[in-house]
Image (cartoon, coloured by chain):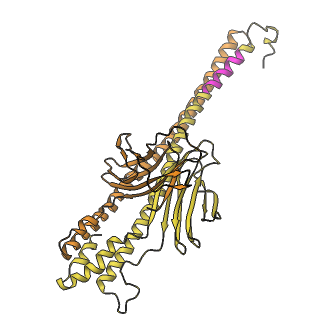
Amino acid sequence: VAVPGAVCVAMPGAVRVAVRALCLAALLSALGAAGTELTLELPDSDRRCFHQELESGIKFTLDYQVISGGHYDVDCYVEDPNGKTIYQETKKQYDSFPHHTEVKGVYTFCFSNEFSTFSHKIVYFDFQVGDEPPILPDMNNRVTALTQMESACVTIHEMLNSVIDSQTHYRLREAQDRSRAEELNGRVSYWSVGETLILFVVSIGQVMLLKSFFTEKRPSSGGAGT
Amino acid sequence: LALYFHIGEREEKCIIEDLPSDTLVVGNYKIQRWDIQRHDFLESAPGLGMFVTVTAPSGEILLSKLYGPQGTFSFTSYLSGEHIICFQSNSTRFVAIAGSKLRIHLDIRVGEHFLDDSAAHAKDKVDEVSVRLEHLIEQIHHVSKEQDYEREREEKFRKTSEETNSNILWWAIAQTLILISVGIWQIKSLRDFFIAKKLV
């Protein structure tokens, strides 16, 4: 990963103009299409909605994942500006929903925890809008082939994008697994202590109950015993 | 500013950001109020502001300021962990008028430094190139920081799993021992009791 700077700088001065115009401007400002990723906490029996205004003919993708809470599931639905439900799922752990908009207007997506009575969930979602613009300004209309430097820039950009994606993926999976492990640990501790207490209570209770059967109050049944 | 959501007048809504240490977070927001007469959200409501509160993983408040109806807030994380960013309007309307709500537009960026200013002030092409290069290097550093933080979390995860494993093992052994000793105590106690009662 020490390469990115080196490639674009080690060239003769005349080519530097080309560098600025093509390589770095595109590499760095092309942070991808617009998108929002947020992590929020959904209390039990609650629903949170988000809205976004979109043109028609745009592609958007909604990815969401439940990081912790209860059975790690949530309801999700997406509505178009006309109120029509274009996506609806109940009790999903994670999903990805791509869609091409047909109508211009405000799109709504909501996460609902209404089916749960006591577990609040932590949900991560990522709403990406639009296709990524090509990182070189006229990459698609060129007559000549890409220079070595330009194609190196394109490669770096694509690799960095995949680094971001895989980093997010692993971060979410790890957070979810860690949450499960901590829950398991807590459960094991509490139940162990509880079981030990029950063990003591039951065994002492048994002995005392038996002793009480043979006390002076019922001398006649003392011999019959068990 | 694209994504928006609604909150009530005095409601507080929070989002969670899990950050490595020394990370800059910048947020752009815009808040609008619903106007009953015009049945629409006002473009800008004078006097309307928003409290932004940022809580660090240790519980310490990193940022707690009142901002105007539109603006930018930023903070740098000192510890790594879950930071909670909360929004609440400073509206003084205690009685929620029917249908009154606020719309918040939000855009949060983590670990990015805007290069617009420095790039615009670059003296010539070479400077611009080096400015952009530095921006790129900073972004790669952020990737590396996130990975270090991920390693920290995974270690915590592994410790929890191993602790659970040994918990189960020791508690199982302890409970078996307790079971056996309590059983022996029961029999002894009952035998002594019956002998004392001259039944055996």
User: In the rendered structure, which segment of residues is drawn in magenta?
Assistant: A199-211
Q: Is residue B185 magenta?
A: no
Query: What residue is drawn where x is 30% and y is 52%?
Result: B22
Q: Note whether residue A11 is visible.
A: yes
Quarter location, residue A224: top right
Q: Position of residue A67 (x, y in %)?
A: 51, 53
Of the chain colours in the picture, the one used for chain A is yellow
Q: Position of residue B54 (x, y in %)?
A: 38, 45
Nearest the eye: A18 or A178: A18
Q: Where does the C terminus of chain A fall, quadrant-wise?
A: top right
Task: Characterize the magenta stretch by its predominant secondary structure.
Answer: helix
Q: Position of residue B174 (x, y in %)?
A: 53, 33
Number of dots carrying numbers: 0
Nearest the eye: B90 or B189: B90
Q: Which chain is orange?
A: B
Q: Residue lying at the far front in this picture: please name it.
A: B37
Query: What residue is drawn where x is 18% and y is 75%?
Result: B124
Q: Residue lying at the far bottom in this picture: please name it.
A: A143
Q: Where does the N terminus of chain A fall, quadrant-wise?
A: bottom left
Q: Is residue A81 above or below residue A221?
A: below
Q: Note whether residue A94 is visible.
A: no
